[in-house]
Amino acid sequence: MGRLTKSQIRNGLAAFVFGVALCTFVNCATTQPTERTGGETHFLKACDNNASCGDATACMCGICTRPCTDNNACQSLAASAQCVSGAGRPEAAVCQDSPLSSFCDAPCSTDESCRALSSALHCESGFCRSNTNVADAAICVRGQVTGSEVLLVGDALLASHQVTTDLQDLAHQAGSLGASDLYRDNSSIPGNSLALTTPNIASQYVQGQASSPVKVVIMDGGGADVLGGTCSSPVTASCPLLVNAAVAAEQLLAQMAQEGVQQVVYFFYADHADPVVLAKTDLLRPLIQSACENSPVPCHWLDLRPTYAGHSSEYIQADGISPTNAGAAAIAAAIWATMQQNCVAQ
């Protein structure tokens, strides 16, 4: 090969410089890819400002997404993305003062349906969310609770045992429950109040603890009291029916703490169609929530109203109380998300 002329050297150097500049401009293959969640950069990532959401999405109600009027506006984010009202999301409380009515989201029923979008997502209260909200694997020590050490107690929301079946399926899929391992479910239709009758939910727990040690309790309670008892009109939080139910919840949580229960998930009811029942339930909710939040055993509160929002006819049977199969699946998904977030029986 002959020696290069000065002109060839100058031309080659110019081409090299241009190539470097062009590579910088278009992000050549050697550049590290940007972080992606779902089908679009940052979609559904947890956020607190627009700067953390990149150019394609914005921080809305705590997640990176975009406003929409129909599903077509969301398809570029992910194939399964839909335009959903803000009222039904896990972030409903964050969004309550926002004028935004709808934005792109990814509804789900299991963690696996979210992982089809990205390994960084899990299913939380019916919607795919970033795993940054889940207890970090280095902190959450797994395999410390067996299936038999998890006890479910409660009323009509659990008594068909479909919620428990669906919850076990989610735990099996996540590898948190052995293939042949099962939770224990002592919920029942009779004897399922907090304080109105005996036996009651406390009796379900006592029976379960007597059979074998319990580390985790998943429960609801108070609905049977509201349905079976009365309050004078107008209904107030001082109604003995409601006060007694709240005191019974406090006492049961204290008993659990004394007997070695390590964590409780307490889930509470969606809105009831009957206005009288609804009024009592609305007054009992903060009383039970306070009992949970001040419990001597760690108690994780789950309000099912966001889960049921917009789905009442689909999730509730004709009796106005018991969940349909779809409702049971939604309840189980919400419970499982709470368990994941708080490293409960993982």
Image (tube, rainbow, N blue to C red):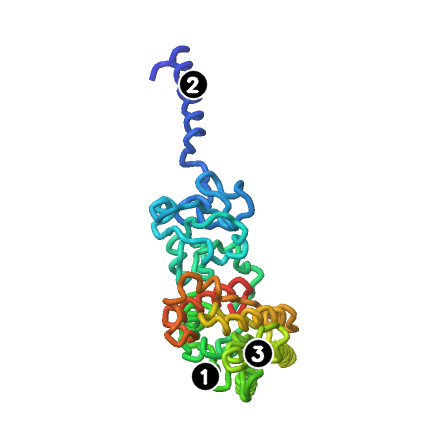
- In terms of secondary structure, where does tag 1 sit? loop
Q: CA distance from mark 2 to mark 3?
A: 89 Å
Q: Residues within 10 Å of mark 3 (few under 14, many from 20)?
A: some
Q: Amino acid at mark 2?
A: Leu
Instruction: Say which label, 1 or 2, has the lower sequence index.
Output: 2
82 vs 55, left or right, is left
Q: Amino acid at mark 1?
A: Ile
Q: CA distance from mark 1 to mark 2?
A: 83 Å
Residue 212 against residue 68 in the figure, above or below: below
Q: Is residue 256 visible?
A: no
- Nearer mark to the viewer, of 1 and 2: 1
Q: Name the residue: 45% across, 50% down.
A: 101
Q: Which image quarter: residue 287?
A: bottom right
334 vs 314, left or right, is right
How many numbered markers are drawn?
3
Q: Is residue 69 visible?
A: yes
Residue 184 against residue 113 in the figure, above or below: below
Q: Name the residue: 54% across, 85% down.
A: 200
Residue named by callout 3: 231
Instruction: Say which label, 2 or 3, has the lower sequence index.
Output: 2
Q: Which mark is residue 189?
A: 1
In the rendered image, residue 7, in percent from the top left (x then y), is placed at 39, 11
- In terms of secondary structure, where does tag 3 sit? loop
Q: CA distance from mark 1 to mark 3?
A: 22 Å
- In terms of secondary structure, where does tag 2 sit? helix
Q: Residues within 10 Å of mark 2 (few under 14, many from 20)?
A: few
Q: Name the residue: 42% across, 52% down.
A: 105
Residue named by callout 2: 13
